[in-house]
Amino acid sequence: MTAALEEFCKVFRSDSAGSHQKMEADNYDKHHIETTIWGVSKHLFDYSEVVTFRAGNGSQRQYFATDSPRLCRESTYFHERLHGSGCPEAQSRHFELKDTDPSVVACMLRWYRGWDCPSCGHDRGHMEDAMLLAVELRIPRFSKHLLGMMETLNVADLSRLDAMAAATTTTTATAAASP
């Protein structure tokens, strides 16, 4: 009985050792990451979908980056320029917006990410510039978003003017009533 048990253990050990080594090799192949000489993954970042923008001139020049699927989903302009034949942006994946205020481009990219722009709530000129950019780049949902913000700002301004008019009327009536 002991000899049979020893034989079984010997066969079991050799089989399990072989299958364990095979499992480790399979896992290594499956999870092996190709690295640079510095030990950093060669495929850490995939830049194939990145689009860059340059906005402003001189000391006001700024660079931005975002992903092309998001741009193309909302804008026929970006879709045509990035996927059209003969368009320089299809090759370079870069847009020059030299005459556009960088804060307006930042506003557009914030909207794409679902974030609020800090300037839109109070700067009417900024919102008008953003609206012009939205129309130029054919981004209808961004235009609607800006229109809604402008209407909200107009209502707030009218409410403020009504309050000022009421305060002025009260002050004038009080001054006229006093001897």
Image: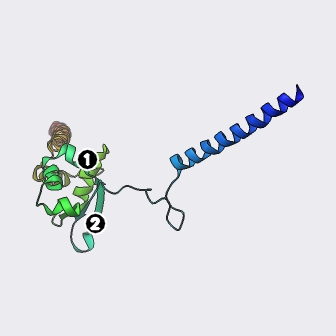
For the residue pair 153 and 45, the one nearer the viewer reads as 45
Q: CA distance from mark 2 to mark 1?
A: 22 Å
Give the residue drawn at x 21%, y 39%. 156
- The kind of secondary structure element at disc 1 is helix
Label 2 Cα crowd, 10 Å radius (few <14 / some 14-19 / many 20+): some
Residue 58, image x, y percentages: 23, 74
Q: Identify which amino acid the numbered label 2 is placed on.
A: Gln
Q: Identify which amino acid the numbered label 1 is placed on.
A: Pro
Q: Is residue 176 above or below residue 130?
A: above
Give the residue drawn at x 87%, y 31%. 3
Please state if 25 lies on the left or on the right of 112 as rendered: right
Residue 29, image x, y percentages: 53, 49
Residue 161 picture quarter: top left
Q: Is residue 71 above or below residue 95?
A: above
Please state if 113 lies on the left or on the right of 35 as rendered: left
Q: Which mark is residue 62?
A: 2
Confirm whether residue 55 shows in the render.
yes
Q: Which mark is residue 69?
A: 1
